[in-house]
Image (spheres, rainbow, N blue to C red):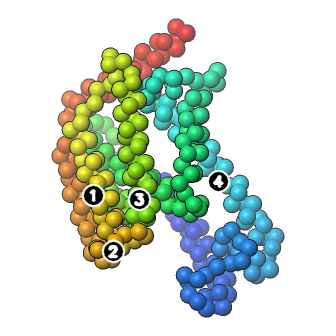
Amino acid sequence: MIGSVLIGTTIYIALQVAFLGALPQEALAQGWAKLTFENAAGPYAGLAFSLGLSPLAYVLLADAAVSPAGTGLIYTATSSRLVYGMSRTGFVPPVFERTSSKDVPIWSILLGFVVGLIVFFPFPSWQKLVGVIVSAYALVYAFAPVVFGALRRQEPERERPYRLAGGGVLAPLAFVAANFVVYFVGWTTNLKVFLAAAVGAVVFGASYLSRPSEDRPPLDWRPAAWIPPWIAGLALISYFGSFEGGTKALPFGVDLVVVAVFSLVVYAFALSVRLEPEQTKRYIDEVIDVEEDSQVQTVEE
């Protein structure tokens, strides 16, 4: 994992050095804010056109159209399996558990396709959509260090094939970093992300309540008590922040300190309301029971 990160970082740095070295001086006559390329969809293709490297420019444009397909395939699979898993554990309707003869969750894929089409409507450009995706995924990844810290306290004696050195320090720093990413996107974009999260919560609640009471998995609200103030606090800081759409009531520098302190307070609060060890074991046992029942049903069918 470290090697893959280092390789990717090296490639991106090399790309930036190549771009800066090949950029004509006159292109910066009006500063970086006015840097544009005629008849080009991106800086590298535009630079190739300006240098007379049309074949390379067309290769770059073709790659820009083809390469997202790989990412699309990956996220089509992961999002459909996420919905499938939520259905198996009782949080969304059982229709999303249905699979084809090749064990492909068809209904989950169709749901992801419909949601994917819907999210295109509120965004005027690809760049705006990318900003929303970045903010949304930073929110998702922010849960990982919290879960890491909680599990170390909930099951300290569990055998771990790999144990992260300095995890007690790295986890809260990772949570701070994720919140920085969300904040840097700016209020204009984050407003859409937070509204989407609110709509998702409503849909999730309605889906959960639509199942018979005996089929609903239990919900413990206390361990999730940190999430609403976390989202509300991030929205508030983003609104008063110095990035896109913010009121700039928090000047740059001060806002970073506010985000960092707020993140650490939320992280500490999240660990304080974590599940107790016996609750963790109960949930694990319930998930195993669901899996065993499903396997028995599959065998009978």
Residue picked out by circle 4: 68
- Can you give x and y, in whole percent of width and height, for residue 46 in the image? 71, 75
- Can you give x and y, in whole percent of width and height, for residue 110 in the image? 59, 34
Q: Nearer the viewer, mark 2 or mark 1?
A: 2
Residue picked out by circle 2: 248
Give amino acid for label 3. Asn
Residue picked out by circle 3: 190
Q: Secondary structure at mark 1?
A: helix
| Frontmost residue, 25 versus 107 | 107
Which of the marked residues, 4 or 3, is nearer the chain's N terminus?
Answer: 4
Q: Is residue 16 left or right of residue 263?
A: right
Give amino acid for label 4. Pro
- Say if residue 168 shows up in the picture: no
Find the distance from the CA under tag 2 to the CA under tag 1.
16 Å
Residue picked out by circle 1: 233
How busy is the neighbourhood of tag 3: few (under 14 within 10 Å), some, or many (20 plus)?
many
Which of the marked residues, 2 or 3, is nearer the chain's N terminus?
Answer: 3
Q: Are marks 2 and 3 in contact (CB under 8 Å)?
A: no
Q: Is residue 193 left or right of residue 95?
A: left
Which of the marked residues, 2 or 1, is nearer the chain's N terminus?
Answer: 1
